[in-house]
């Protein structure tokens, strides 16, 4: 009973904070609202006894929101907590589409005859998750690792302002100068 | 607490994120919308796992979704940085070169 009430409360907090992300008038407040939404979902995961997943969701998202705040200050070039902003397009169409998707999903959720629960969770879910990813589901981890490494490389390459056409010219034949002097050009 | 309640809550989160991803002009705000959508997916996956088949394997799916969020964040920030460096802008409307 207590867990049900707590879940309802957290669901309302998560959704309200999610709505607040796009309603508040500054990016700093939007970042905090998104962090609140993620923390609420992380606590909901703890209600399902998913201690490991819930805790890493909370930790990761709080850190991510902190980084997001830094990026906003960097790109917007202002104090984002004080500067009102409203930068939207096609607000009405987006709201209609999102509302329609919600009605469709909610209808499907209520109409689908969900099957009975099969099996019961083990006592220590964190230990069983560790054994699973180091055993029968190791392929998932083996796939995730290079994907994350490729993401790091791709993000650095993408964010680099000087590509090969900047360095070698449009025909890729120009060589970089040997030194900073005028006579060092090749 | 039933599966239906969990799924409706996750659908609400997903649709709020969908609204944000479609309506916002700033790249970082679009990323926030995408993050909210994945937030809903995590909650739905956790609810389905708990109420239908709470085997240890199901938790691996949640890890994959969290990884997808990480990748989305890293690539989104890289795109935002590139856009800002090349065009002095962080708006999606300034990067419509490929639109038909």
Image: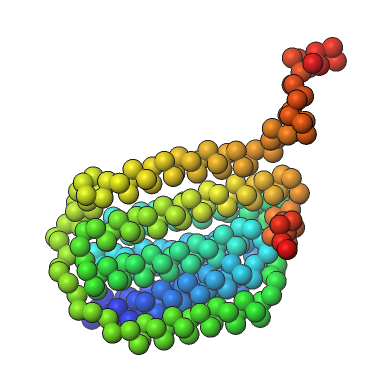
Residue A67 can be seen in this image: no
Placement of the N terminus of chain A among the 4 image quadrants: bottom left
In percent of the image, x 77 and y 24: which residue is there? A174
In percent of the image, x 21 and y 46: which residue is there? A135
Looking at the image, which is closer to me, A44 or B67? B67
Looking at the image, which is closer to me, A105 or A8? A105
In the drawing, does residue A104 fall left or right of residue A79? left
**Residue furthest out toward the top:** A183
Q: How is the image coloured?
A: rainbow
Q: Position of residue B71 (x, y in %)?
A: 48, 50
Q: Position of residue B94 (x, y in %)?
A: 75, 58
Residue B43 sits in which quadrant? bottom left
Placement of the C terminus of chain A among the 4 image quadrants: top right
Residue B46 can be seen in this image: yes
Q: Position of residue A79 (x, y in %)?
A: 68, 55
In the drawing, does residue B78 fall left or right of residue B37? right
In percent of the image, x 46 and y 77: which residue is there? B12
In percent of the image, x 17 and y 72: which residue is there? A118
Q: Is residue B76 above or below residue A81?
A: above
Count of marks placed on residues: 0
Q: Position of residue A60 (x, y in %)?
A: 42, 52
Residue B65 sits in which quadrant? bottom left
Q: Is residue A27 above or below residue A8?
A: above
């Amino acid at each position: 009973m207590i867990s049900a009430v707590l879940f309802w409360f957290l669901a309302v907090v998560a959704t309200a904070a999610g709505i607040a992300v796009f309603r508040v008038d500054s990016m700093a407040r939007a970042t905090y609202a998104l962090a609140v939404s993620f923390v609420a979902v992380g606590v909901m995961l703890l209600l399902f006894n998913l201690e490991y997943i819930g805790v890493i969701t909370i930790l990761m998202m709080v850190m991510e929101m902190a980084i997001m705040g830094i990026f906003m200050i960097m790109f917007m070039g202002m104090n984002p907590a004080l500067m009102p902003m409203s930068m939207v397009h096609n607000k009405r169409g987006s709201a209609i589409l999102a509302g329609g998707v919600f009605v469709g999903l909610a209808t499907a959720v209520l109409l689908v005859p969900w099957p009975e629960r099969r099996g019961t969770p083990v006592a220590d879910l964190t230990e069983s998750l560790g054994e699973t990813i180091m055993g029968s589901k190791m392929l998932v981890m083996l796939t995730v690792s290079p994907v994350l490494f490729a993401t790091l490389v791709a993000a650095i390459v993408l964010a680099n302002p000087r590509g090969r056409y900047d360095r070698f010219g449009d025909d890729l034949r120009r060589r970089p100068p040997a030194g900073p002097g005028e006579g060092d050009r090749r | 607490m039933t599966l239906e309640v969990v799924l409706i809550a996750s659908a609400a989160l997903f649709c709020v994120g969908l609204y944000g991803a479609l309506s916002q002009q700033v790249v970082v705000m679009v990323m926030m919308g995408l993050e909210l959508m994945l937030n809903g997916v995590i909650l739905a996956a956790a609810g389905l796992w708990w109420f239908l088949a709470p085997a240890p394997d199901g938790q691996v799916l949640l890890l994959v979704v969290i990884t997808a969020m990480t990748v989305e964040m890293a690539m989104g920030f890289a795109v935002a940085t590139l856009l800002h460096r090349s065009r002095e802008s962080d708006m999606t409307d300034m990067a419509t070169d490929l639109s038909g």
